[in-house]
């Protein structure tokens, strides 16, 4: 069975953000929880590359919002960002090789 783009988005970004939201809720970090829940809403259609790219760009801004994360949350966020960046590189890569002129 081949993995689709949407399957990859779910496995690499959506499921980890859902896990992170659970942790943030347990820790009482409600503003952070709300912000990451907003990212999940952006990913409601994981087959739509434009929506996913918008969510990845938004996700990359989490370091500049003034949130303070526990060590466990920070590790999860770093992993999510790494996966999201890798995913965004695959979206921006041409589907066919281009030749230099």
Image (cartoon, helix red, strand yellow):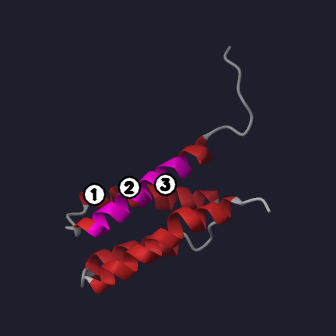
Which tag, 2 or 3, sits closer to the chain's start? 2
Spatial separation of the CA atoms under disc 1 and disc 3: 16 Å
- Whether residue 47 appears in this view of the structure is no
Q: Are marks 2 and 1 in contact (CB under 8 Å)?
A: yes
Spatial separation of the CA atoms under disc 2 and disc 3: 11 Å
Task: Give the residue number, with chain letter if any, for mark 3.
Answer: 83
Which tag, 1 or 3, sits closer to the chain's start? 1
Quadrant of the drawing holding the C terminus? top right
Q: Helix or strand or loop: what does disc 2 sit on?
A: helix
Q: Which mark is residue 60?
A: 2
Residue at the spot 29% in from the left edge and 63% down from the top edge: 74
Say few, some or many: other residues with alpha carbon within 10 Å of mark 2 (under 14 / 14 to 19 / 20 or more): some
Quadrant of the drawing holding the N terminus? bottom right
Please give the range of residues in magenta: 72-88
* 83 vs 40, nearest the viewer: 83
Asked if residue 83 is among those painted magenta in the image, a careful observer would answer yes
Q: Which mark is residue 63?
A: 1
Residue 62, how many percent across, how many down?
Answer: 32, 61
Prevailing secondary structure class for the magenta stretch in the rendered image: helix
């Amino acid at each position: 069975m081949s993995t689709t783009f949407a399957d990859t988005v779910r496995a690499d970004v959506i499921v980890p953000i859902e896990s992170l939201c659970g942790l943030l809720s347990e820790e009482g970090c409600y503003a952070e929880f709300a912000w990451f829940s907003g990212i999940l809403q952006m990913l409601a259609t994981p087959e739509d590359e434009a929506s996913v790219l918008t969510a990845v760009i938004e996700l990359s801004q989490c370091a500049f919002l003034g949130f303070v994360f526990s060590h466990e949350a920070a590790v999860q966020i770093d992993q999510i960002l790494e996966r999201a960046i890798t995913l965004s590189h695959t979206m921006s890569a041409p589907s066919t090789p281009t030749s230099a002129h």
